[in-house]
Amino acid sequence: MLYFLCHFSDVDECANKEMHGCDGNAMCVNEKPGYKCNCHIGSKLDNTGRSCRTCPNDSWGIDCNMSCACSTAAASRCDPVSGCVCNPGYTGTHCEANINQCLNKTCGAHAECIDQPGIDACQCMPGYRNINTSSESSLQCQDIDECAETSLNDCDQKCNNVDGGYNCTCYAGYHYDSTLRKCVDINECEFKTSKCSHICNNKEGNYSCDCPPGFRLDQDGHTCKGTSQKIVTITLDYTVTENVDWNNQTSKKYTELKTATEQLLYNVLTRVMKDLVSVTVTKMWSGSLHVDTDLLVSGTNSASSIAQGLTALYKARDLALLDQHVTVTNVTVGGQPFHLNGSLCQRREEIEKCLDGQVCEEEGGTCRLVVDALH
Ligand SMILES: [Ca+2]
Ligand SMILES: [Ca+2]
């Protein structure tokens, strides 16, 4: 009878906490007859049917009936209420989808948008770095000076910083090989960029010129000139008034007298010897003043040139050495006296004879081949 009554007049057990057994974390839902306990999203009833427990690992939703199965790389965790929580740049139930971060995104100067999940969309372009340390939201991209740190460049000689990158450059004599990424010696001889008139020697970073026998490299370092070298002993009537240590060629007095003598001889000889290269006093001794002089002459007719030079020297009357007026009193070439008298060819012969089969022509004092008219 009681049952019958109850059937028709339901009691709302949920209205009175004393009348239902649902725990505080569960919701009481009245039913006819009786009632039931329900759980909030993200939890489900335990075995007692009265108490709710948070969804166990990898499940979520109403009564935990959804499986998370989140993408491990793209999700940070499985939330019992909402499911997979995606890392920045990912979306989808399992965080399996990429969000294009660059849609409608504008980055600042020297910055670019990179749609790569997990990083901020705006990044400094290669060669630049963010110098704004206070806030990530406003990038300030500044050129990296790769040349300031050796670890940031691979230049082996010179580094040239430029906006957004750097260039490697080389010292003179090298060129940059972009394949080898280093400076390589320029072979000036192979590429005919040297100015050598005769023989070119390539060297690391430069080159040098050489001359065949009988030629001498000019002071320009490139041109070979025919040369002749003669040791001539000249006596000047210079009175040595100060103590000169003739055995010490590095003493001050000796050096002064040597330099002044070289200058004097050069000045006189060069008036008539346009091919005179240098005058070097190799030895001095006293009496009057005796000097051994190394005359270096370029050109093809050096013997004649020296003969004319020595003649001019003999005849000069305006010579001044240091504070004295001097004249040349004697000249010997190869130990033999040089004579002022005679023709240019005779004087030339005292310097150097013409070769066999050659004769000296008075005009210019040059040697020429004898052509036998009978043959
Ligand atoms: Ca740079
Ligand atoms: Ca070279």
Image (cartoon, rainbow, N blue to C red):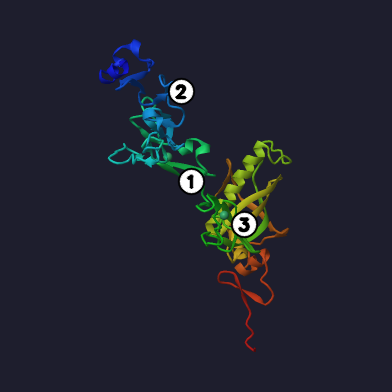
Please name the amino acid that badge 2 sits on: Asn
The answer to whether the residue labelled 1 contacts the one labelled 3, judged by CB atoms less than 8 Å apart, is: no
Regarding residue 225, the answer to whether it shows in the image is yes
- Mark whose residue sits in front, 1 or 3: 1
Vertical placement of 295 versus 70: above or below? below
List the residue tagged with mark 2: 47
Q: Position of 267 compared to 243: left or right?
A: left
Circle number at residue 62: none
Q: Is residue 312 left or right of residue 140?
A: right
Label 3 CA crowd tier, 10 Å (few <14, some 14–19, many 20+): some
Q: Quadrant for the C terminus, please.
A: bottom right
Q: Tell me which amino acid carries mark 1.
A: Cys
In percent of the image, x 52 and y 43: which residue is there? 154
Residue 207 against residue 167 in the figure, above or below:
below
N-terminal-most mark, 1 or 2: 2
Q: Label 3, on which residue?
A: 296
Quadrant showing the N terminus: top left
Q: Is residue 308 above or below residue 41?
A: below
> Is 292 positioned to the left or the right of 144 in the image?
right
Ligand 1 near label 1 (Cβ, under 8 Å)? no
Residue 214 figure quarter:
bottom right
For mark 1, what is the residue? 168
